[in-house]
Amino acid sequence: MGGWRRRATADAGLWKGLNPAMALAAKAVVLAFVLATIWDVDAAGAVFGRIRAWIEGTLDWFYILVVAAAVLTCLVLAFSRFGRIRLGEDGAVPEFKTSSWIAMLFSAGIGIGLLFFSIAEPLFYFDNSQSAGYPNNPGADLAGAVLLNEQRAVQAMHVTYFHWGIHGWSVYVVVGLCLAYFGFRKKLPLTLRSALYPLVGERIYGPIGDLVDLLAVFGGVFGIATSLGLGASQMATGLDVLLGLDPGVVTQVALIAAISLAATLSAVSGVSRGIRILSEWNIRLSLLLLGCFLLLGPVSWLAGFVASSLGEYMWRLVPMSFWIADDPGEAAWQNSWTIFYWGWWISWAPFVGTFIARISRGRTLREFIVGVMFVPTGLVLLWFGIFGGNAIHLELNAAGGVGTAGIMELVRDANYEAALFATIDRMSDIGWLTWAMSATATLLLATWFVTSSDSGTLVITTLLSLGDAHPPRRFRIVWGLGIGVVAAVLLLADGLQALQTAAIAAALPVSVVLLFMIAGLLRSLARER
């Protein structure tokens, strides 16, 4: 298995440390996509929209089965005799302490979604207005919870848990586990191609391997750029609340520039310094904001609400995992939410999984699965329960009647970024406390973006250097700043929605690769003593 580096990466010159063919192909495809999109934004959006609509309408069953297969694989391996296998040599020890490891995988795996969707999504499912043109929550309607009451609130939260729970994280686990196992134990490159070695052998160093790794690069670039562009609007909204700044395009581009610069500096400093330190501060700030939401909210009501929602989630987990809607309205909801989320998790899995693998050397297979699949999931479910629960409680007890607090109205108008700050504003009458919480949320938005972007930059350059855990710094700078430029240009051209749609469509080939990765991993494990 040795000698791959001499054949795949340049030993000298401009491309030293990288695979020249892959680096050029990645830049060419990204540049072509950006130019084609800004040339005719509407046409590009329409093309990718049709592709996405075809995938969601025709292959919804396939996405559901792929994600279910990932969950099943994780559970079987975690409790099998293979759980004792170490991701590295038999005597290897973890590179990072457990608290730092959890902080980094949490920052890379979730990031901005915690704040962007924690209010908006539960309220969308709680609503019954069908403002999007289809039922807000078909499951609640089928259960008879059609009124805006606590029963519907529980139904809303358990659907949110379903989309952010173990299913999404299991996709990350499968990719990360494959890379860590083949990279650290089998001494293959720390890239996606290595998981196919048991199936295609040395051909992973040819076009097959290049294509698989390029899919991961594109997913990383498009995913990070989309998050930077779409999330900048929420940060701009926060600055408007705090300082009265215009939340327009100029502010959003300035925020993208600042975050890209900070993320690039963090990526250049490496995992042990910048990424690790920022991830740990993310956790501290998150716990501070979570504590504020808990203490200012109806604590006893939230405890009962979260417990009831978790119970409903666990009770409904299996049937929801395999449910395929046939009614047109229910199918529209499932495509817009569940299939969208499964595609989004899959499209992000290559670069998130690569980063998780990079920081997991020395851990056992069982420790990896349990740590990545269940620890972040528990924190995410607690977060959504407390944040979304507060917003729902405000709507249930609004002075003008249920649903008149104004937060749900923002969600109906698709003003998702403002829902968080509207909830904070209604939680307390103390001006300085409201301002401090809004400031913390805005700062947290920025730090989540930085940690998602810097880990993504490191992964992209790792893939292009064929698994080098410490890729050349100059290329980290080029790709870190380049992703920011892509996000800013597409924001100015109003092409970010087209980019997001393209990222979801790209999940189809990645999902096929994912199945081959599972097959390769199981085949290799079967040969372990």
Image (cartoon, rainbow, N blue to C red):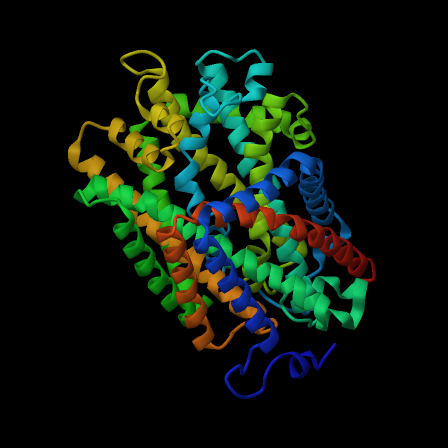
**Residue 261 point in image, percent of width and height:** 34, 64
Residue 282, placed above or below residue 10: above
Specify the quadrant that holds the N terminus: bottom right
Tell me the residue at 33%/21% (across/down).
394
Whether residue 386 can be seen here: no
Tell me the residue at 46%/60% (across/down).
35
Tell me the residue at 68%/23% (across/down).
326
Residue 299, placed above or below residue 30: above
Residue 286, placed above or below residue 181: above
| Badge count | 0
**Residue 84 point in image, percent of width and height:** 71, 56
Specify the quadrant that holds the C terminus: bottom right
Q: Is 212 displayed left or right of 237 in the figure?
A: right
Whether residue 507 can be seen here: yes
Q: Is 107 displayed left or right of 518 in the figure?
A: left
Q: Of residues 191 and 493, which is closer to you in this image?
A: 493
Q: Of residues 426 and 11, which is closer to you in this image?
A: 11
Q: Is 61 displayed left or right of 497 in the figure?
A: right
Tell me the residue at 77%/73% (across/down).
202
Residue 67: quarter of image: top right
**Residue 355 point in image, percent of width and height:** 54, 60
Residue 525, placed above or below residue 318: below
Q: Of residues 10 and 49, which is closer to you in this image?
A: 49
**Residue 227 point in image, percent of width and height:** 43, 50
Residue 183: quarter of image: bottom right
